[in-house]
Image: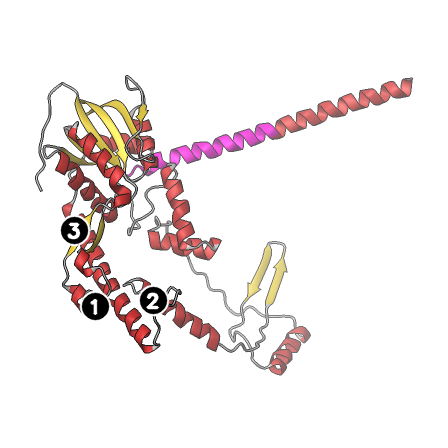
Amino acid sequence: MAYGGGRSGGRAIRVLNVAEKPSVAKAVSGFLSKNQQGGLRVRDGRSRYNKIFEFNHTINGQPCHMSFTSVTGHLMELDFDDRFRRWHSCDPVDLYHASVRKFVPEDKSDIRRTLEEEARKCQRLILWLDCDREGENIAFEVIEVCTQANRDLNIWRARFSALIEREIQNSVQNLVRPNQLFADAVDLRQEIDLRIGASFTRFQTMFLRDAFMINLATDDRNLVISYGPSQFPTLGFVVERYWENQSHEAEEFWTINCTHNTDEGAANFKWMRGHFFDYACAAIVYEMCIQEPTVTVTEIKEQEKLKYLPLPLSTLELEKRASHFFHMSPAHTMKVAEDLYQTGFISYPRTETDRFSEKTDLQWCFSKPRQACRDVCKREREREREAVKVGKDAATVTDTAAERRNNN
């Protein structure tokens, strides 16, 4: 892929910026337009949901007139050519070799037209898509649409992990080239999902229809039995766990707990045996403990226990902990995480790593929450002092009123 264009000297150039969501476009535009001459201006694009923000900015000494718009997730879809899209057009196994095409669907045509119109007026394209492989793939979808309208665009990628001003300002001054390999990996995954999912879905749906002699033309039920490379194994885990729970037979057991209370606190002792399945045996041991409540300490073992610093959460670990501690579904967890990310509270939540980048300034990241906590505590103390003061004043007024009544 060719990247055209270069620096235009001291004259201002027009730059098209594209984010993955309208909210991200609005947030980044707000950060970059601060203290800039002309401020932030907003106008409508072809899509009613994807506004265009305009402002001035300087990138590495180059004055720029920035136009900032957005897409809404993937701009393109992958599907088979029309001659393979009908269920009876070919044998399901032929779908592994059938030709596929990537195209902009009709419901995204307004976004495509906005990108084409803006690209024709610009010399540079900056991609602000989410910094994961999926975001890189969407970036190349945007590139394909924009370069069809203007092949001379100078194309750059902004990499950022959080929607905070410092991160955004640093990102726009350290632009990089988009990564074609990341985008190709997503294209390959999409094609594998399409071929496997479509072929197996058609095969098992038609096979079971014939086996049970169901006429799809007269039966109004939704009888598509879908298959997906991720969906089907996950369903297998769910069913296997369900069968385990159904086959489990509960059995009563008894255990003995011992607690020693002192002025320094309580000590809980664990029984090495664990538990009894026989009530009579448990009762005998319990009676022995009641009759002889004195114990002898025969040995004291001390062991140093180290706790490692908590690691950043990968997406999978985030979903596991949210499910365990808060009983949140993965979908709900990611929605909350996306909302927190878009408001600047956390870094991008869709990640496979549990490591911070070496460039991440953790001290700075925690400085604002630390100060916010101090402000909350300070306000709470002031509120408590004010409540005490009001209480004393009220008591004084009440006592004075009572004295007046008594004197009268």
Mark 1 = which residue?
92
Q: Is residue 87 above or below residue 49?
A: below
Mark 3 Cα-neighbour bin, 10 Å: few <14, some 14–19, many ≥20: some
At mark 2, the secondary structure is loop
Q: Which contiguous range is marked in magenta?
A: 360-383
Q: Amino acid at mark 1?
A: Pro
Q: Residue at x 23, y 61 (%)?
A: 86
Q: Is residue 138 left or right of residue 335?
A: left
Q: Assess whether mark 3 and mark 1 are in contact (beta carbons under 8 angstroms).
A: no
Q: Amino acid at mark 2?
A: Ala
Tag nearer the camera, 1 or 3: 1
Q: Amino acid at mark 3?
A: Asp
Mark 2 Cα-neighbour bin, 10 Å: few <14, some 14–19, many ≥20: few
- Residue in the foreground of this view, choosing between 393 and 268: 393
Q: CA distance from mark 2 to mark 3?
A: 40 Å
Q: Is residue 343 left or right of residue 378?
A: left
Q: Residue at x 8, y 39 (%)?
A: 2
Q: Quadrant of the C terminus?
A: top right
Q: Quadrant of residue 46?
A: top left
Tag nearer the camera, 2 or 1: 2
Point out residue 64 in the picture as x, y percentages from the top left corner.
Answer: 20, 23
Mark 3 = which residue?
184
At mark 3, the secondary structure is helix
Mark 2 = which residue?
217
Q: Assess whether mark 3 and mark 2 are in contact (beta carbons under 8 angstroms).
A: no
Point out residue 237 in the picture as x, y percentages from the top left corner.
Answer: 37, 68
Q: CA distance from mark 2 to mark 1?
A: 20 Å
Q: Is 372 part of what is drawn in magenta?
A: yes
Q: Which is the main secondary structure of the residues drawn in magenta?
A: helix
